[in-house]
């Protein structure tokens, strides 16, 4: 009698198998997944051509031997290279929206995305208004802003042409070419000289802000990203000083600038003790993202 064929795994069993493999490898997370289990879900969902959220509704479905094999190969590459999974898959998810991703730009993961999607920024986004995404990277925040507020225009700039090439793909992917303009240049140098027709109701920015000591302590996954997108100088405030210095020139009278600073709260307070920032509540706490109204900068 022929032996019975081996029973195929379910999606859930494959996820758990991959999660155990990743957990045993002492990896670091934070590039779209918080731990081995969530990264395994993301990895396996890609092999079955579903979003991570959709995959949760198919956990008891069978997965083919070929799909399981591909998932294991990806997990092996993740472990061997220590690269963020987003680079290996060529895709990242932010607030449920997919974005093309490559080593040409930082993996999208900004806390600003939460504020865009939950409507917290709408008071500074009037119908027909203008927004600017400084240091746009692969364009994920600019795209989310345009998707969430289809009646505004978004400009987005970055110093890195390779990053902007990925941003252009993402803008096109989500059908936003008529709503989002991409500009290349070093911060404000990417924009025309400020005038009454060239001011913004809201400026958002997730700049390089990691201080020099922290840069030296980052695990391998972060060193796979462009240094240009992470390093913020000795106290993490090098670019933020330049951003705040010229923000008043580009803000409308009742405008505001929103900046993510990560774990640099103390360094920000030391650098800008005179600025009455509004600290926004996000999933990581109330000391990671700040908003400054134009009137406080003039």
Image: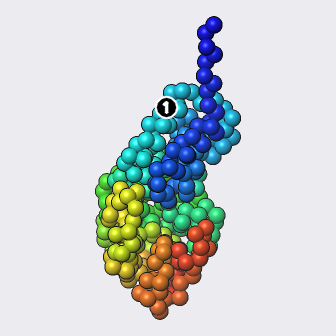
- Mark 1 surroundings within 10 Å by alpha-carbon count, few (fewer than 14), some (14 through 19), many (20 or more): few
Q: Quadrant of residue 18?
A: top right
Secondary structure at badge 1 equals helix
Residue in the image at 48% along x and 75% along y: 263
Q: Which residue ends up furthest to the bottom in the rendered image?
A: 274
Asked whether the viewer can see residue 30, the reply is yes
Nearest to the observer: residue 66 or residue 279: 66
> Height in image: 117 above or below 231?
above
Q: Which residue ends up furthest to the top in the rendered image?
A: 1
Q: Quadrant of residue 95?
A: bottom right
Q: Residue 131: percent from the left, percent from the top? A: 49, 67
Q: Residue 14: percent from the left, percent from the top? A: 58, 37
Q: Quadrant of the N terminus?
A: top right
Nearest to the observer: residue 56 or residue 245: 56
Asked whether the viewer can see residue 171, the reply is no
In this rendering, the count of numbered labels is 1
Residue in the image at 66% along x and 32% along y: 61
> Height in image: 203 above or below 296?
above
> Height in image: 134 above or below 34?
below
Residue in the image at 39% along x and 51% along y: 82
> Which residue in the protein does label 1 denote?
69
């Amino acid at each position: 009698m022929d032996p019975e064929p081996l029973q195929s795994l379910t999606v859930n069993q494959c996820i758990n198998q991959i999660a155990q493999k990743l957990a045993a490898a002492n990896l670091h997370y934070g590039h779209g997944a918080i731990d081995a289990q969530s990264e395994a879900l993301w990895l396996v969902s890609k092999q079955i051509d579903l979003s991570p959220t959709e995959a949760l509704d198919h956990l008891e479905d069978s997965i083919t031997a070929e799909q399981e094999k591909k998932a294991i190969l990806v997990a092996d590459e993740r472990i061997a290279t220590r690269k963020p999974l987003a680079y290996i898959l060529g895709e990242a998810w932010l607030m449920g929206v997919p974005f093309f991703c490559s080593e040409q730009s930082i993996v999208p993961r900004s806390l600003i995305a939460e504020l865009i999607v939950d409507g917290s920024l709408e008071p500074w986004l009037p119908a027909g208004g203008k927004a600017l995404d400084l240091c746009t990277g692969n364009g994920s925040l600019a795209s989310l802003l345009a998707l969430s507020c289809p009646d505004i225009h978004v400009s987005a700039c970055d110093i890195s042409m390779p990053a902007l090439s990925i941003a252009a793909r993402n803008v096109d992917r989500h059908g936003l070419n008529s709503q989002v303009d991409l500009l290349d240049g070093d911060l404000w140098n990417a924009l025309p000289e400020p005038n009454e027709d060239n001011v913004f109701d809201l400026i958002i920015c997730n700049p390089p802000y990691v201080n020099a000591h922290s840069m030296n302590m980052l695990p391998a996954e972060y060193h796979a990203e462009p240094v240009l997108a992470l390093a913020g100088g000795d106290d993490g405030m090098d670019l933020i000083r330049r951003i705040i210095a010229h923000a008043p020139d580009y803000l409308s009278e009742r405008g505001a600038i929103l900046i993510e600073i990560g774990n640099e709260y103390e360094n920000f307070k030391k650098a800008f003790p005179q600025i009455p920032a509004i600290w926004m509540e996000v999933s990581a706490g109330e000391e990671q993202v700040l908003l400054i109204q134009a009137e406080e900068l003039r």
